[in-house]
Image: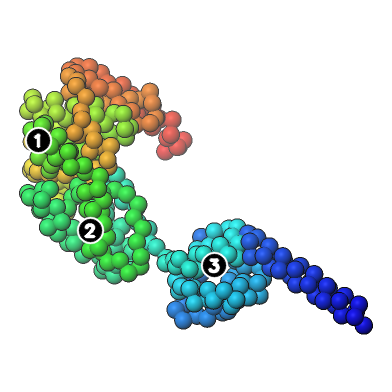
Amino acid sequence: MKRLIILIIVVGLLASAALGAWTYRDLHTAVTHTKTGQYIEIPKGTPPSAIVSRLVAEGVIKHEWPLKLYLKSTGKGSTLKAGEYDFPSPISPLGVLAKLQQGQRRLNRLTIIEGWTRWDIARAMAQVPEFKLENDAQALELMNNVSLIKDLDPEAKNLEGYLFPDTYEFSPETTAPELIEMMVKRFRNVWKPDWTERARGLNFTTRQIVTTASIIETEAKLDEERPIVASVIYNRLKKDIPLAVDSSVIYASKLEGKWRYDGKVYLSDIQRRSPYNTRLYAGLPPGPVASPGESSLKAALNPVTSDYLYYVRNPDRNDGAHNFYSNGAEFETGVQALRKWERERDARNATPGR
């Protein structure tokens, strides 16, 4: 009888040890699931056991009772937070627990592209349902809050140029004005304190540097060419030669509500009497014509030294590279080479029979 009792005890201890080892392994074993990229909502007030059951049903956790037992024995059930969770795959039950203790909320994401104007940004913001904007105009109106940049640019009439291009992640409760503040704050984080002094050293205001950078952004695709484009702009300014930049011509048309949004610059655009029309008027336009990125801001502050006055796309490359010229005759030769390449390209792409 005594031996039987001892045997029962030994078997019980072994079973407990085995169960403990299995539980430990289960809690630490990562499970592969298919819910990555999908948010699972855990409402406020959901009991810990219900949370575990939900995650088992979703396939994020394989077995219910090990994690339920762990939560009950450790008292950590009270540390779980409501939220919207995107669990990576694979993930262990203890990894799931760690995320539930940290809390997570679904974030919206909006990408502002380098070279976008405030009209482009307004259009993108109007498509975010949580902002509850009735149209682009409402978003555009919010971009007139120049108090956000008064110290940087006391002449500003709107936030053009200061809405920094980047990908922004924000909670669904974020308002449209708050997102605009985030964009301006991001600009301020990029704009180094000594850049203002650097601008003064070039005899430019911050506004003029941002305006120059906005032109560079719309003209140069390659980072290494941006300082060269900057030199062309400054050389033309010194010689009082109109910059003749299409992006400023387009901006002038947008200001008057005349831009057709078909990618084509019409004669009426070129002839528009606007200080933003750099084909008709020498000097910088009155303000930025787009949102410049960091590399364009740096280029505006650090132009190379050159005697270039012109540039035209290099037809021998397909990466947006340019050829740069110091005189009109060479420039015209470059333009004709580009036009020839464009005609040959169009001929190759033409559909037979048309």
Q: Would residue 245 be visible to someone looking at this image?
A: no
Secondary structure beneath label 2: helix
Q: Quadrant of residue 333?
A: top left
Of labels 1 and 3, the one closer to you? 3
* Quarter where residue 56 is shown: bottom right
Q: Earlier in the sequence, mark 1 or mark 2?
A: 2
Q: Is residue 325 left or right of residue 100?
A: left
Image quadrant in which the C terminus is located: top left
* Disc 2 packing (10 Å; few <14; some 14–19; many ≥20): some
> Where is mark 2, residue-wise?
181
Q: Position of residue 23 (x, y in %)?
A: 69, 68
**Coordinates of residue 111 in the picture (x, y in percent):** 34, 52
Q: Is residue 325 above or below residue 254?
A: above
The crowd level at tag 1 (other Cα within 10 Å; few <14, some 14-19, many 20+) is some
N-terminal of the pair, mark 2 or mark 3, is 3
Q: Which residue is mark 3?
A: 97
Residue drawn 9% across and 43% down? 286
- Furthest residue to the front? 2
Residue 23 located left or right of residue 280: right
Name the element at disc 3.
helix
